[in-house]
C-alpha cells in the first residue's frame, strides 16, 4: 500500500481513513563554511600633516588598535544577511532575494574580483537606496548617518562581488579604534569587509608561510582595491591612504602633486614596530576648517609659510631615509631618539601654522613633565589625537601617574604599537591557548558581540594572542609578513590601482 506523508498524517492511497503518525522534523541544513574572522589596523599620520595638501610627502603607519569581523554562515534555508556592529549600536538584516541583484548583475554593471573600480556607479548607488533608507530608523540623525554609511559600504561590496545564490551570513564587527578620531576606523572596517567577502568567494590564496611574496602582494592589492570602493561609499572622495595602510600594514609615504590624479604611495618595508601612546582629546574638529586656516595663513604670509611646509617635507624625507637605511636599529636608543626628535619638530611647525589646540598642548605638557617620550598631534589638528613615541625609560609607575592625570581631565589613553601587521585572517575562528592560558577555543558570535571593551575584545580575539605556531592552520595569519612587498609597478603605486 503506497502512502504519502502530509504534515505528519499518513494518507492511504486506497481511500481508507488516514492514520496519524508522529511528524518527522525536517533537519535544518548545515552551514556551508566554518565561521572565520578578518582583522585590519587603524592608522596615524606620523609626519607631514598639512604639508601634504601642497604636494609634499607625508608618512602614515599602522597601529595595533584594530577592527575585527566575524563571519558566520547560516543554513541554506536562511536567506538573510545581517550586519551587526554593537560598538555603534547597529544591527540590521536584509532578505538576500530582495536585494537589487538584477541591477548589479547586469552585463554592463557586473564587476569581477580582479577589476579596478575607481568611482561609484550612480545607478548602483541609486539601486541601494531603498535598502539603506530602512537602516536604523529610530536612531538620531548623526548615528543614522554613520549606520547607513557602514551599510552602504557593505552592500556595495556584497552586491558587486557576490551573486543571488550567495549563502546567508551574519557579519559581526567589533573595533578597538576610536571612531571619528582620524585614526582610519572606516578604512579598517572596509578592509575587513573586502577581505571577508573575497575569502567567501574563494578568490584569495593564502596567507601561508610558503606563499611567494609576489603572490602575497597580489592578494593585498585585491583586498585594497575593494576596500577603496568601501571608502568611496563612506567618504565620497577618499585619498586611499587609510585603506592602503590598513591592508598592507607597516607604513607608507604618500604624495599628491596633482589633485586630478591619485596620490603615489611608497611602502616603507623596514618600518619598525615601536611602542606608541595615543591620547584622544575628545575635542571635535573639522579637517576642512584646519586646512582652510593654513591656506589663509599661506596666502597672507607666503614667504614665511612656504619654508615651514618645506621644513615639514624635509622631516618626512629624513624619517624615511632613516628607517630605510641598512644601519637603522629599532632597539637602538639613538635611532629612536632621532625619530622622536623629528616628531617633536614636526609638531612645533604644525603649531606655528595654527592647527594645534589647548587640549593638544595640555596633553603634551603632561607627557613631557613625566619624561615619557616625544609627542605630536596627528591628523588635521584643532582637536583629535596626539601620539607619543615612548622612550626606553618610560616606567610603568610613570604611565600610571599619567593615566590618573588624563582621566582627571577627561582624555582617553591607548597604549598601542606603531608599524604593525596589515590585514589578517583567522580561519576557522578558533584560537588555541598560549603558554599562560590567554585566548583559546572556538570564537562564537554571542561571546564576540558581548566582549567588554578593548581589553575584552583583544583578550578574546586580538592578533596579539599567543598561539602555538607549530599547530598547522591555527592562529592569525597575515599576507604582509609572508615576504617583502614587491610591486610590478615599482615602489610607487597609485591608490586604488
Image (spheres, rainbow, N blue to C red):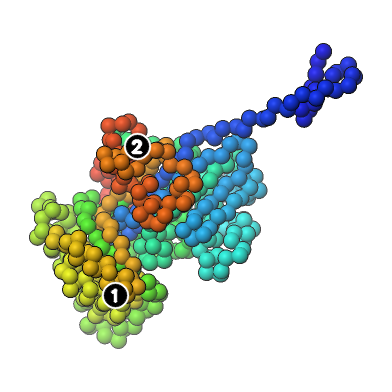
Pointer 1 residue? 360
Residue displayed at 18% across by 73% down: 369
Q: Nearer the viewer, residue 293 or 8?
A: 8
On the image, the x and y values in percent for residue 371 come to 15, 69
On the image, the x and y values in percent for residue 42 come to 35, 57
Judged by depth in the image, the label closer to the viewer, 1 or 2, is 2
Residue displayed at 20% across by 53% down: 272
Instruction: Kindly indicate the quadrant of the structure image that contains residue 245.
Output: bottom left
Task: Report whether residue 225 is seen.
Answer: no
Label whose residue precedes the other's in the sequence (1 or 2):
1
SS type, badge 2: loop
Q: CA distance from mark 1 to mark 2?
A: 41 Å
Q: Is residue 306 left or right of residue 99?
A: left
In the image, is residue 41 above or below residue 358?
Answer: above
SS type, badge 1: helix
Instruction: Kindly indicate the quadrant of the structure image that contains residue 419.
Output: bottom left
Q: Nearer the viewer, residue 24 or 116?
A: 24
Q: Is residue 2 left or right of residue 324?
A: right
Pointer 2 residue? 432
Q: Nearer the viewer, residue 69 or 408?
A: 408
Task: Report whether residue 98 is seen.
Answer: yes
Q: Residue furthest right?
A: 15
Q: Quadrant of the N terminus?
A: top right
Q: Residue furthest bottom?
A: 300
* Residue 95 circle label: none
Crowding around mark 2 (Cα neighbors within 10 Å: few <14, some 14 to 19, many 20+) is some
Residue displayed at 35% across by 50% down: 458
Amino acid at each position: 500500500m503506497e502512502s504519502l506523508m502530509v504534515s505528519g498524517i499518513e494518507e492511504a492511497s486506497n481511500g481508507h481513513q488516514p492514520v496519524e503518525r508522529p511528524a518527522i522534523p525536517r533537519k535544518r541544513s548545515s552551514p556551508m563554511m566554518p565561521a572565520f574572522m578578518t582583522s585590519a589596523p587603524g592608522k596615524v599620520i606620523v609626519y607631514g600633516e598639512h604639508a601634504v595638501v601642497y604636494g609634499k610627502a607625508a608618512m602614515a603607519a599602522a597601529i595595533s588598535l584594530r577592527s575585527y569581523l566575524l563571519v558566520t554562515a547560516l543554513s541554506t534555508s536562511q536567506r538573510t544577511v545581517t550586519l551587526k556592529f554593537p560598538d555603534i549600536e547597529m544591527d540590521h538584516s536584509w532578505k538576500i532575494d530582495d536585494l537589487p541583484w538584477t541591477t548589479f548583475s547586469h552585463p554592463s554593471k557586473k564587476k569581477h574580483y580582479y577589476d579596478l573600480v575607481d568611482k561609484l556607479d550612480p545607478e548602483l548607488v541609486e539601486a541601494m537606496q531603498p535598502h539603506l533608507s530602512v537602516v536604523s530608523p529610530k536612531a538620531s540623525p548623526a548615528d543614522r548617518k554613520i549606520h547607513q554609511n557602514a551599510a552602504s559600504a557593505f552592500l556595495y561590496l556584497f552586491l558587486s562581488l557576490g551573486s543571488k545564490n550567495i549563502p546567508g551570513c551574519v557579519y559581526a564587527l567589533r573595533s578597538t579604534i576610536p571612531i571619528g578620531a582620524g585614526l582610519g576606523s572606516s578604512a579598517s572596517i572596509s578592509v575587513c569587509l573586502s577581505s571577508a567577502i573575497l575569502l567567501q568567494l574563494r578568490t584569495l590564496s593564502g596567507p601561508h608561510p610558503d606563499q611567494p611574496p609576489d603572490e602575497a602582494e597580489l592578494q593585498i592589492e585585491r583586498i585594497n582595491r575593494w576596500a577603496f570602493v568601501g571608502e568611496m561609499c563612506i567618504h565620497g572622495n577618499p585619498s586611499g591612504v587609510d585603506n592602503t595602510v590598513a591592508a598592507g600594514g607597516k607604513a607608507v609615504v604618500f604624495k599628491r602633486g596633482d589633485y586630478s590624479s591619485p596620490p603615489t604611495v611608497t611602502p616603507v618595508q623596514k618600518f619598525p614596530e615601536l611602542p606608541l601612546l595615543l591620547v584622544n582629546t575628545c575635542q571635535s574638529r573639522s579637517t576642512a576648517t584646519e586646512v582652510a586656516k593654513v591656506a589663509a595663513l599661506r596666502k597672507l604670509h607666503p614667504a614665511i609659510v612656504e619654508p615651514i611646509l618645506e621644513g615639514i617635507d624635509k622631516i618626512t624625507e629624513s624619517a624615511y631615509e632613516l628607517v630605510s637605511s641598512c644601519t637603522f636599529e629599532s632597539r637602538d636608543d639613538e635611532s629612536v631618539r632621532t625619530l622622536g626628535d623629528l616628531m617633536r619638530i614636526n609638531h612645533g611647525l604644525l603649531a606655528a601654522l595654527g592647527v594645534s589646540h589647548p587640549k593638544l598642548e595640555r596633553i603634551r605638557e603632561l607627557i613631557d613633565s613625566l619624561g615619557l617620550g616625544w609627542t605630536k598631534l596627528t591628523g588635521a589638528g584643532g582637536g583629535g589625537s596626539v601620539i607619543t613615541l615612548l622612550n626606553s625609560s618610560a616606567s610603568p609607575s610613570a604611565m600610571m601617574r599619567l593615566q590618573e592625570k588624563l582621566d582627571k581631565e577627561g582624555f582617553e589613553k591607548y597604549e598601542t604599537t606603531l608599524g604593525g601587521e596589515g590585514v589578517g585572517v583567522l580561519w576557522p575562528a578558533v584560537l588555541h591557548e598560549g603558554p599562560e592560558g590567554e585566548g583559546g577555543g572556538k570564537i562564537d558570535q554571542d561571546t564576540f558581540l558581548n566582549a567588554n571593551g578593548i581589553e575584552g575584545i583583544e583578550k578574546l580575539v586580538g592578533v596579539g594572542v599567543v598561539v602555538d605556531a607549530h599547530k598547522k592552520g591555527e592562529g592569525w595569519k597575515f599576507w604582509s609578513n609572508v615576504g617583502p612587498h614587491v610591486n610590478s609597478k615599482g615602489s610607487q603605486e597609485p591608490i586604488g590601482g
